[in-house]
Amino acid sequence: MSESPTRPSRAGRTPAPRAQRPDAAAGLPDVDAKNLSTRAFGWVLVVAGAVGLVGAAWLAIEKYLKLVDPNHVASCSLNPFLDCGPAMASWQGTLLGFPNPYLGVAAFPVVMTIGVVVLTGARLPRWFWLTMLAVTTVAIGLIVFLVWTSLYVLVVLCPFCMVVWAAMIPLFWYQVVHAVQEGYLPVGEGAKRLVVDNRGILLAVMYVLLVAWVFLEMGPTIVTYLQST
């Protein structure tokens, strides 16, 4: 009789190799879960750009209607302290010789387009991100100047201007976070982890500081006005 082939025992089987993570198989380092993901960064650009575009476009429309009809009352002119009119009529509202909102109407769609490109997974070069950050830094400087003008010169707040302010803060801040995380802005490891790991908290602090600044400067004036009416 021929002997049947001996089957290997269960204990002697060679265990199948464990599946490797894609990044490990490619020899890439693990991605830190606390890092700003490409997808999140792309969405920040898209959403902040869309919000800023809404505010800028509304102001541009109101400016056009005012040019067509000098007696036009802007829809964002709500009371003596919430009024777009003084901002649009001031020289600060036309720093480059044309209404500031036109800058936003031109720039925010570009920001949204870049966000969409990032969401597709495209990798843009270092010089591109540093150029965009430089332009955004100039823009945020303009925003700070316009906030100062609203509080100390006009003493009135423009509602749709505030929409643009609110959009520019994360747009600027998350570009800084991205540049620090990717090494485009050279900083120490401690500063890098502080910026990247606490980006949400630091963004909230920026909003709190802006609201506190507005409240401290406009609050007493508003209270006095309310008491006199």
Image (spheres, helix red, strand yellow):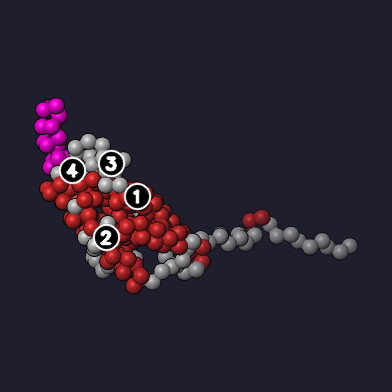
Q: CA distance from mark 2 to mark 1?
A: 14 Å
Q: Nearer the viewer, residue 17 or 135?
A: 135
Numbered circle sitting on residue 61: 1
Whole-percent x and y of residue 211?
Answer: 21, 43
Residue positioned 86% across, 64% down in the render: 2
Magenta stretch: includes residue 36: no
Work out whether residue 174 can be spotted.
Answer: no
Q: Nearer the viewer, mark 2 or mark 3?
A: 3
Residue positioned 83% across, 62% down in the render: 3
Magenta stretch: includes residue 217: yes
Q: Which of the two labelled residues, at mark 3 and mark 1, occupies the earlier sequence position?
A: 1
Residue type at the position of mark 2: Phe
Q: Which of the two labelled residues, at mark 2 and mark 3, occupies the earlier sequence position?
A: 3
Q: Nearer the viewer, residue 173 or 154?
A: 154
Image position of 80 (left or right of 48): left
In the rendered structure, are the residues bearing label 2 and label 1 in contact, judged by CB atoms less than 8 Å apart?
A: no
Q: Which of the two labelled residues, at mark 2 and mark 1, occupies the earlier sequence position?
A: 1
Q: CA distance from mark 3 to mark 4?
A: 16 Å
Residue positioned 58% across, 62% down in the render: 17
Residue positioned 23% across, 65% down in the render: 188
Residue type at the position of mark 3: Val
Find the residue positioned furthest to the right.
1
In the rendered structure, are the residues bearing label 4 and label 1 in contact, judged by CB atoms less than 8 Å apart?
A: no
Secondary structure, mark 2, is: loop
Q: Quadrant of residue 215 in the image?
A: top left
Q: Which of the two labelled residues, at mark 4 and mark 2, occupies the earlier sequence position?
A: 2
Secondary structure, mark 4, is: loop
Q: CA distance from mark 3 to mark 1?
A: 12 Å
According to the image, label 4 marks what residue? 156
According to the image, label 3 marks what residue? 73
